[in-house]
Structure formats: C-alpha cells, structure tokens
Image (cartoon, rainbow, N blue to C red):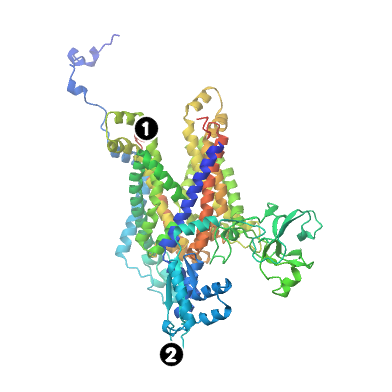
C-alpha cells in the first residue's frame, strides 16, 4: 500500500527508524502497573453508593466508641423519679431540657435510651469483631489444613457431622452457665464451635482449587505445600474470605440479640439485652421508642456491615478489575 | 443401593450415639450440679440435714448419681425377707451421733456401710443438728446414706437400652388375673357393637395394644413405646416424646362408655389405659367405672400437641416458601440487573442482615396494626392466629430460596448447553423452564426433606414472640430449668431428624437427577 506522508511534515528518518533487538527491553512488560489492593479499592469506590454506606458505617462505629467515652451514662440515675420513666422524646425534652441524651426518650428506669443504645452498640460491635477475628483466623487456617490433608479430612468430617448435630444453644448455655455471662464468656461460647462452619466452607473451596492443573504443575516443580497454599490458593480465596466475613460479622450481632432474647445472653448491656429488657414496651402505646431504637440501630449496623462486606467481596474478585 | 443406604444409616446411628454422648458430658460433667437448685423453691425451704438429703435425692432423680438411704436399705432387706419387720423397726432409728446408736442400729449401720463401701459407694453420715440441748432442729435429724456417681458409659448404655420398651403379657408384676392377649373384631370402647378390630392385653402395661380410632393415623399401637427421657421440671414425670405429642388445651369431652357400662360425658381416652396396681378399688370414681386395674388414662384435649402446632405452622410456611421462593428466584434470574432483581436483592439483604428478632417484631407490629391476632390462644382457636407465625417463618425461607435459585440459575446461564440450546433456536422461556431450571433445582431439592422434618422441631423465636405452644421452645425451656432428661431427649430427636434429612435429601436428589447414583455398579 502506498501512503503519502509528505504533507505531514515528517522527514524520512522520523517516519522510519531502525530498532535493534534488545534482550533487556524485551523482558519488560509494557502493560500498566497492576496493584491488587489498589484495584480493589478503585473498583470499590467507583460505585458512589459504597462511599455513602462506608461513611455511614464509619459514623456508626466512631460514634459507638467515642460517644460512650466522652459522655457519662448512669442507668439508675433517675430510678427514684417515677415521672422520668418511659417518656416519649418530646416529654423527655420537656422534662430535662433539650440535650442529646433525651432525643429518643427514656426507658424503664428513667435512663436515656439514646445513651443506652450507644453503650449497647459498642459492646455488640466489639463482640462481633472479636468473634469474627477469632473464628475467621481459626477457620481459614484449619480449613486450609483440612482441605490439603486427606487424613485430617476423614477425621474432621466426622467431627463436623457430630458437632453439627449438637444444638448450638446447648453449647452456649453450658458455657454461660459454667462461667458468668461476661463478655469473654460470650466470645468463648460463640467461638468454641463457630470456627467449624467457616473451616468447612474453606475446606470445600480448597478442595476445589487444590487439584487444578496449575497447582499440579507447581507441585511437580517441587513447590512446598505451604508455598502453594499461600501463593497459589490464598489469593484465589481472598474474595471468598471477604464475602464470608461480610456475612459473619453481622451474624454475631444477630446471634447475640437472639441469645439475649431467649435469656442466655450477656450480663452487660448489649443491644440484644436492651431489646430483651424492653420487649414489654413494644406492645405498650407510647413506650415504642425504647424498644424500636435498639432494634433499629442493630438493624442499621448489621445491614451496613453486610453491604460494605459484600461489595468489598465483589471488588476483591480480580475478574471485576478489568 | 440398599447396601449404600444401610451404610449411611449405620454411619448416622454412630453419629447420633456420639452426639448424645457429647451432650451427656456437657450437661452431667461440665455443668456444676449445684446449679439445678438455683430456681428450686423447695430447696430454699428445707433446712439442715434435710437439705443434704434433698440435694442427693434430687440429684438421683436428675440422673447424676445413685443414692441409697439407710432406711431404703432396711426396707429392701425386709422386702427380700432377710430381716423381719420387727428387726427393721428396731434398727431403723439411728442416734444423734454414732455413739448413741442402739445395739441393733449399730449392727445394721455397720452392715450398710460395709456393703455399700464394697460396691464402691461413698457412705456419709451427718450427726443431728440440735436447736437446744435436747431438741433436734427443724430438718436436723441424723442421716446416713450412700451414693455413687453414675459413670458416663453406664448412663449412656442405660439410656440407649431403655430407649424402646416392648409391652408383653409379663410386663406387670403381680397381676391378679389371667395373663393373655385377646383379639376382638368389636372394640369394647365403642360399645362392642361397632366393627373395629383391637388387640387387648391382660398383664401387659397397656390395655390396648392395637386399635383404630378417628384421629390420624387411624391405626394406633402401644406395643412399642419410645422413651426419650423422663422430664423432671418441664413436664414432671412425663416422657419427652409424650410431652411433644400429647394434645394440649381444654378437655374435649365426649360420650364415653366405661368398662362397667357407665356412660357419661368424659375426656378420658380409654385406649390409652395403663395398669396401676390396686387402683380399681382405691376410690369410688374408679370402682364405678373400671372392672380392671387398667385405670390410668390420658385425657383428650381439643388442641394439637406441641409438635402438632409446630408442624402445622412449619409445613404451611415451607409449602409457601417453595411456592413463592422458587418462582421469584427464577424471575430474578431472568430479569437480572432489572428493577425486579434489584428489589429482590434489597429484600434478601434485609432478611439476611437484619437480626431475625427485629423483623419478626416488625411483622408482629405490622400484622397487629391491620387487626391480625398477635398471640396464640389454644382455647379459642381461629384460623387468623396462624397467619402471622406462618408469614414470619415463611419470609426468611423465601429470601433464602430466592437467593440460591437466582445464584444457581445465573451460574447455569453461561453454560455451553444453554448457548447450544439458544443457537438451536429455542426461545428464552423454553431454555429457562426446560433446561436451566432442571439443573438449577437439583441442589434445592436436596433441602426439601430437611425443611419438612425441621418443621417438626419448631422455631424458637417465632413461637416465643407469638406465644405458640409449640415444640421449638422445649430445648431452651429445658436448659433454663436444668431438665437433663428433656435436654438429652430433645437432642437425640434433633440428631435423628438431621441425619434422616441428609440421607433423604440425597435420595431425593438421586430421584430428580438421573446422573446421580449411589449404587456401586454405576460408578
């Protein structure tokens, strides 16, 4: 084909220069630099809704930790004042004057509902994070070993089948009765068998990926199993683990609420315990705020955590990075 | 196939035995046995040495240990004829301290101590607690007893061997009539004229071993009785299985003709009569009605049983969940990323993320404001009171089914066979219903037996919130009341159901999907 470049103002040399083969240059990849976590956050923040939800989550968490630290809350401060009990927000503000404490009214002991839900949120969120951290760490490590070793697999499958049939509330109630119902007892109760489900999930994922061709090849080349697990399989599972985490953290809050409701919960003032204590207020006209406030805040926390986790899970899948 | 099933069942049986063992360790060994007195009003009342004996007798009832008091030991000796009644009454009174025992008492307390020590028991004696110098304090009489902890293996063995009891004509000791089994075409309960076959035993524990009546499943038997464990505090003295299956509510009276010919309005169910020695002549009420000592009858009540209520609510909500969840899931997959998919996703996220307690209360509030009854009342049953519990149970299962159906459908949508079908000119409707659905439904089918069987066990929160007298709260109630018998029984029941539902699920799946086969040949 014949092109006429004379009108473009290039000289003959500029249009065609001889490029010699260069061994060093040919090794370079000219694609843009790829950083995994950078891409994860790029994809995550591309959706504007994620920023809003993340901001909401940050607000809830910071408020739950900072507010109780800077404000003083005395559950039984107004115990002797009969006129301070079960007040609607308007009535409480009339009585005590406008203050952030009274914007959600008062509870059964004349305490501030607003303060109570933030104290409760702090305990519930802490419980969820601690339990999730312990269960995920144990679950992922044990699940990986479980998936790799056939001997461990036979043994662990039996353990899984047996423990799975023992009612979970039985474990928890035994733990709560053995020790006092403190924060760490609840952590122990929720983690003593909680990791098993996660480990089983991870095991299934490992079994699926373990025998893929690239791992087989890696094994033939003499890569140690630990290195295969860490370098070949773990990156594959990042999105799975993040997605799992997204369902796990809110589930502990739900579980704590459930346990408190059936009377086996914490002795501390968690969200679940607040709901349990205010249950009678639900059906009483005019007392609704003290019941629905902890329910609402528990729902907001769990939904926000879940949505952030799910979207982070989606973003951490490298197939979405294109 | 049969071989495989048998293997699975045996495996499940092993699993169940271990589960019961684990639960027994948890409740008998790990829990402090003093805990059971925490809510016991009687315990606070009894004083001094009586408190100690009360403690041990209660522990024996709860299955912790074997307890024998000195008095029981002497009664046993009298009964077996080793000592006479006079000797017994001479030996039974023990002194305030061992030194003050009478000669006879000294002899027998030594025998007692030696005998039980040789059998591995711990023998304890507490001296009398004195209020004044000469007056024994309230409940302070001297006591002597022996006890031995029951080892786990023995406890588990006793439990499993006692699980099924078979009625036979020698079941009752010292039966005062002729033992035997009688078959009749005309059940005497119906006046002896209506055609209704029945097998009647004499000397058996139950009077009626096999009979027909008008309630489901119409043919009933008392030959084999299931003993899951006797309750102590939840439903005192009654077996767990009976607690779950006996009818509740107000007595349902009907015209009953008693064996002596008296006909009156009564709630007695004569078919359930069991033998109680000497009960016929114990009072006039029984003497007027019964001609044998088979007088202990269950009463007919007009409500369902605990399990019945749970099952009715559970099964309807399961049906509702599959009828709504599956089509909605398919719709979401077909309209992927459209409005309906987004609304569905919001609903799923809501159900998964929000604590179940919160949305059940929300439904209760909404239901209550439109005028639906929010609490169950078994004495004035209406169909309306079932609505809210059913909805509360169905909505989360619908969300769950929608989530998985959508996931499986979308995973299948990119398969080669779908592309092939599309290139073959099939329209989208045909592809979805005839090709994708058939593949996507397989994992869903696996869960059907599980959800049907799970509705027998009831739902904890739903039943609590709507005050349903169902089986769901049995376990939590038993845990709160330290009712060990019920805890073990309910756990066994749960474990059996869970093992069965997995096996049945696999069978179901093999029926739906011809590619799945459990026989060895096909592999």
Name the subunit of mark 1: A
Q: CA distance from mark 2 to mark 1?
A: 84 Å
Answer whether labels 2 and 1 touch (C-beta < 8 Å): no
Q: Are marks 2 and 1 on the same chain?
A: no
- Image coords of residue A145 (percent x, y): 34, 42
Describe the element under mark 2 as helix, strand or loop.
loop
x then y, percent, for residue B328: 55, 41
Q: Which residue is mark 2?
A: B132
Chain label for disc 2:
B
- Residue A251, given in percent of the width and then of the height, sits at 42, 52
Q: Position of residue A156 (x, y in %)?
A: 40, 45
Determine the image quadrant of residue A214. top left
Depth check, front residue: B445 or B217: B217
Circle 1 residues within 10 Å: few <14, some 14–19, many ≥20 = few
User: Please, is residue A115 above or below residue B396 in the view?
Assistant: below
Residue under label 1: A211
Q: Residue at x 80, y 60 (%)?
A: B191
Numbered disc in front, either 2 or 1:
2
Q: Is residue B253 left or right of residue A189?
A: right
Does B352 appear above or below A97? above
Q: Nearer the viewer, residue B65 or A313?
A: B65
Q: Is residue B88 above or below residue A267?
A: below
Residue at (50, 37) in percent of width and height: B333
- The quadrant of the image that shows the C terminus of chain A is top left
């Amino acid at each position: 084909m014949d092109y006429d470049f004379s009108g473009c103002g290039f000289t003959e040399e500029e249009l065609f220069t001889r490029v010699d083969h260069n061994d060093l240059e040919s090794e370079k990849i000219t694609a843009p630099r790829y950083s995994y976590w950078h891409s994860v956050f790029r994809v995550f923040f591309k959706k504007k809704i994620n920023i809003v939800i993340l901001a909401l989550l940050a607000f809830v968490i910071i408020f739950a930790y900072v507010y109780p630290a800077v404000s003083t809350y005395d559950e039984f401060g107004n115990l002797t004042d009969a006129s301070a009990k079960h007040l609607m927000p308007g009535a409480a503000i009339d009585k005590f004057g406008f203050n952030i404490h009274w914007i959600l009214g008062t509870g059964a002991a004349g305490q501030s509902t607003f303060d109570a839900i933030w104290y409760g949120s702090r305990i519930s969120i802490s419980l969820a994070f601690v339990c999730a951290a312990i269960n995920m760490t144990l679950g992922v490590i044990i699940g990986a070993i479980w998936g790799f070793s056939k001997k461990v697999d036979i043994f662990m499958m039996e353990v899984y089948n047996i423990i799975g049939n023992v009612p979970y509330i039985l474990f928890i109630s035994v733990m709560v009765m053995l020790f006092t119902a403190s924060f760490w007892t609840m952590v122990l109760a929720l983690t003593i068998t909680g990791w098993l489900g996660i480990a089983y999930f991870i095991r299934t994922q490992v079994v699926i990926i373990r025998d893929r061709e690239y791992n087989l090849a890696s094994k033939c080349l003499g890569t140690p199993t630990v290195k295969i697990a860490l370098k070949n399989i773990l990156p594959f599972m990042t999105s799975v683990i993040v997605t799992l985490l997204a369902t796990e953290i809110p589930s502990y809050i739900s579980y704590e609420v459930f346990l408190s409701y059936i009377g086996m919960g914490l002795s501390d003032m968690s969200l679940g315990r607040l709901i349990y204590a205010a249950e009678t207020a639900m059906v009483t006209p005019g007392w609704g705020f003290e019941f629905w406030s902890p329910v609402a805040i528990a729902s907001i926390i769990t939904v926000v955590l879940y949505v952030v986790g799910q979207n982070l899970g989606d973003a951490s899948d490298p197939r979405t990075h294109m | 196939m049969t071989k495989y099933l048998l293997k699975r069942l045996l495996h499940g049986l092993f699993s169940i035995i271990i589960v019961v063992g684990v639960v027994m360790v948890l409740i008998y060994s790990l829990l402090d046995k003093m805990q059971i007195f925490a809510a016991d009003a009687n315990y606070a009342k009894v004083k001094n040495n009586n408190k100690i004996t009360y403690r041990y007798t209660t522990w024996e009832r709860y299955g912790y240990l074997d307890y024998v008091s000195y008095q029981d030991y002497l009664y046993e000796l009298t009964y077996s004829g080793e000592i006479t009644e006079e000797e017994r009454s001479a030996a039974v009174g023990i002194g305030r301290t061992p030194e003050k025992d009478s000669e006879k008492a000294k002899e027998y307390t030594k025998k007692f101590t030696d005998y039980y020590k040789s059998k591995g028991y711990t023998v304890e004696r507490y001296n009398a607690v004195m209020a004044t110098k000469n007056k024994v304090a309230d409940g302070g009489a001297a006591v002597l007893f022996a006890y031995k902890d029951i080892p786990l293996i023995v406890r588990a063995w006793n439990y499993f061997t006692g699980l099924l009891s078979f009625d036979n004509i020698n079941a009752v000791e010292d039966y005062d009539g002729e033992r035997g089994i009688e078959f009749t075409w005309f059940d005497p309960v119906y006046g002896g004229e209506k055609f209704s076959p029945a097998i009647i035993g004499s000397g058996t524990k139950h009077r009626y071993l096999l009979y027909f009546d008008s309630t489901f499943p119409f043919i009933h038997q008392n030959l084999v009785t299931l003993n899951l464990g006797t309750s102590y505090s939840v439903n005192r003295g009654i077996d767990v299985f009976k607690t779950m299956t006996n009818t509740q509510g107000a007595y349902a009276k009907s015209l009953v003709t008693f064996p002596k010919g008296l006909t009156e309005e009564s709630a007695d169910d004569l078919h359930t009569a069991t033998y109680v020695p000497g009960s016929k002549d114990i009072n006039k009420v029984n003497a007027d009605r019964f001609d044998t000592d088979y007088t202990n009858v269950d009463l007919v009540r007009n409500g369902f049983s605990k399990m019945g209520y749970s099952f009715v609510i559970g099964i309807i909500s399961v049906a509702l969940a599959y009828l709504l969840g599956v089509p909605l899931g398919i719709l979401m997959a077909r309209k992927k990323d459209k409005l309906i998919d987004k609304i569905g996703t919001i609903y799923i996220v809501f159900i998964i993320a929000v604590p179940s307690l919160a949305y059940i209360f929300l439904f209760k509030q909404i239901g209550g404001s439109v005028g639906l009854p929010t609490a169950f009342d078994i004495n004035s049953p209406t169909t309306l009171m079932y609505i809210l519990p059913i909805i509360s149970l169905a909505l989360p299962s619908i969300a769950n089914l929608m989530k998985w159906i959508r996931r499986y459908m979308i995973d299948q949508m990119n398969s080669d066979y779908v592309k092939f079908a599309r290139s073959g000119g099939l329209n989208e409707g045909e592809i979805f219903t005839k090709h994708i659905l058939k593949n996507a439904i397989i994992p869903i089918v696996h869960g059907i037996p599980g959800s049907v069987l799970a509705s027998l066990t009831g739902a904890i929160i739903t039943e609590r919130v709507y005050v349903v007298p169902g089986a769901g709260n049995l376990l939590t109630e038993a845990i709160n009341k330290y009712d060990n018998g019920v805890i073990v029984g309910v756990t066994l029941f749960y474990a059996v159901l869970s093992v069965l539902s997995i096996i049945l699920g696999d069978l179901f799946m093999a029926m739906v999907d011809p590619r799945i086969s459990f026989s060895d040949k096909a592999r």
